[in-house]
Image: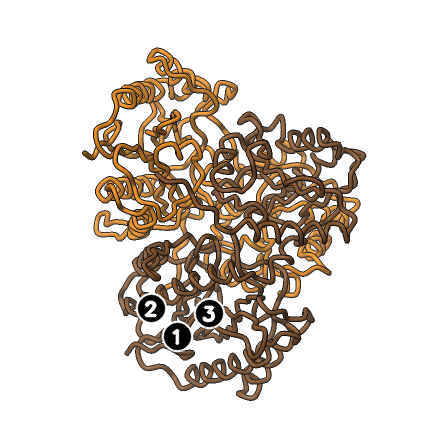
Chain colours: A brown, B orange
Amino acid sequence: MPAIAPAFSAAEYARRLALTRAEMRARGLDALFCEDPSNMAWLTGYDGWSFYVHQGVLVTHDADPFWWGRRMDAEGAKRTAWLSDDRLRSYNDDFVQAVDRHPMQDLAALLRELGLARAAIGVELDNYYYSARAHLTLAHELPEAHLSDATALVNRLRAVKSDEELVFMRRAAKISERIQDVAYEKIEPGLPKNLLAAEIMSEALKGYEEDGEQIWGDYAAIVPMLPSGPDSAAPHLTWDGRPFQKDEATFFELSGCYRRYHAPFCRTVWLGKPPQEILDAASAVAEGIEEGLEAGRAGARASDVARALYSALHRAGLQKEGRCGYAIGLSYPPDWGERTISLRLSDDTVLEPGMTFHFMPALWTEAWGLEITETIVIRDDGPAECLCNRPRELFVKD
Amino acid sequence: MPAIAPAFSAAEYARRLALTRAEMRARGLDALFCEDPSNMAWLTGYDGWSFYVHQGVLVTHDADPFWWGRRMDAEGAKRTAWLSDDRLRSYNDDFVQAVDRHPMQDLAALLRELGLARAAIGVELDNYYYSARAHLTLAHELPEAHLSDATALVNRLRAVKSDEELVFMRRAAKISERIQDVAYEKIEPGLPKNLLAAEIMSEALKGYEEDGEQIWGDYAAIVPMLPSGPDSAAPHLTWDGRPFQKDEATFFELSGCYRRYHAPFCRTVWLGKPPQEILDAASAVAEGIEEGLEAGRAGARASDVARALYSALHRAGLQKEGRCGYAIGLSYPPDWGERTISLRLSDDTVLEPGMTFHFMPALWTEAWGLEITETIVIRDDGPAECLCNRPRELFVKD
């Protein structure tokens, strides 16, 4: 079997590392330890389902980063990361889920070996996988180190996508279109939800052909969500075996994934003849999206996009609060968002070309939920671009 | 759409709560906060893909537990947990992924309201999702509380499965058999891996019919692993678009899932005519499993199972170290194991009827990996039972 091709060019990884070091310098950090698998992948290319054990990437100023993790996963790092073998450090299997020792003792030993026992080290305090005990153990092992919170330091650098990354996002978007098409094609009253989820998952992995190249589908960081009727108020319930019903809306919160890059894309399907109320709401959302895209220009603010959407909704008599979007791109379970910029009134981040968001107006009533959403990219000039291309309306199947 | 049926009987949830409180009493805990989604589900029935935000279940001695989480997810708790509405407490969306506040401030307010500001409170220090910042925030907000490590307190109580749970495990096992059958049926030289992963995912969700009832498939806590040839040394790499090759082994590390219960089950397929070496290894593994099952009796120790396996492997000249199994059952991503008992020489846990394990002898050489594994349950009498029923041998497709 041929080797796995690196996801990106050497120049792209060099760009990322330079950005990271500049930010570390600005914060006075000698070292940065990233346990977030998305940050690990962004920095080194490492890609594996090994984030259920402690692992991470250690960045310093003077030499290539280290990948650090479980012994057997170093083999995965050899195959997927651009690092040379001497930058892969791993701990013995005895440390895995043991009660009498902790992998962070091994990491601390590496930090001491590198002369970082008294260094200023950034750690991701509020990130999945960097557990409370991991932090307490590291702090205990390195009493003279200055550990400080670097949550989302790298995540924020990921916000602006390079051209290479946008190629991946566009491929994910093509897969998103296809899985929405399958959902619409197959849904019908009486069909158990799990069978439609099976069709969606299968289509997502199949991928498609592009200029003679087979674009394979990766697993999304979140499983398909497809709540119907009043259950839409509980949008994070996953499927079960109950059948779809006539005279109900189902929204499909889905994302295609290409090599860990996502392009979430939601549409809502009504089975039967929809009430005027939801048709009107869908028109208002479509108008709101259009105005949000107009507002989503380089130099504007994240809040401007939210404001444009909400004002269109308010004109139609619809109330909406909270956030209506978030930064999107490379991700691992349990979340496909980057957990940085939000499209909401309180977020005044200035939009830059190459930033990508899931722009997701969602409306819920007692009777139905409506999601018509787009993955958007901020352009050099002009309004934001949508990566998927399907009608922006309530889908009806009568 | 009809309501979601509770997963288990009231008596079953009462049993779990009684066990938990007894252990809390033994450790002198006034309260226990579980952020582990598996523990949340085991205690209350709550089931949703919402673990990417902070949430948890709070157990005290004198009244029903609280479900605590994000506002919109309380709607999911209403639909899936056995708790009455007044035991659901939630925080505003402003707390979600904000930098100026933390959901644990809201949890601390609840704890103060309940008179627990000076209580002895167990927290899961080394669990996914209970982040370092979550813990530091809670400790800061409740300076007079005594927070102590209760990692795996509930996980350990989950080790012995009730009859109701074993019904779910057996259903998961039936799905596991079906997805292994599909893998064997569809694999062939030239087939891109992602297409086989698509077939496996789809089959896993379809489920099957049992006595006229449709048993629907749930998502497994880990995506399919299907490494081939030398890549088997990196067992946590996920699929890509490369084709299967003749004269290579591929092992399939898969699990069916029924309502969050898992029954992992692995088989290895050789495309072409296998070398004698791997055939001999497969025979030794089959013999080792048989002897491990014999050793896996109530009253014996976890280490006895490992010892029986290793001694059969050693007789065949095969060296194997590390653990060869782990406790299994209810789970959410990123891991389907319970992270408690390991089948390894250093684990002297006494086996009890109803305990379930993934008994997973795995062998790796430079050229191939071999996994032939079983989900087993410890019985009242006699050797351990395998939940899946397929030949215990190297599968060959010539």
Give the residue at mark 3: A387
Image location (x, y in percent) of residue A7 = 48, 50
**Residue type pointed to by label 1:** Arg
Number of the label disc, if any, that sits on residue A390: 1
Give the chain letter at badge 3. Answer: A
Q: How far apart are marks 2 and 1 (CA)?
A: 9 Å
Residue contact at pointers 1 and 3, CB within 8 angstroms: no
Same chain for labels 1 and 3? Say yes or no: yes
**Relative to A368, is B370 above or below?**
above
> In the orientation shown, which residue stands out farthest toward the top?
B315
Residue drawn 28% across the image and 40% down it: B180
**Residue type pointed to by label 3:** Leu
Instruction: Judge left or right: residue A269 versus residue A68.
Output: left
Give the residue at mark 2: A181
Residue contact at pointers 2 and 1, CB within 8 angstroms: yes
Same chain for labels 2 and 3? Say yes or no: yes
Same chain for labels 2 and 1? Say yes or no: yes
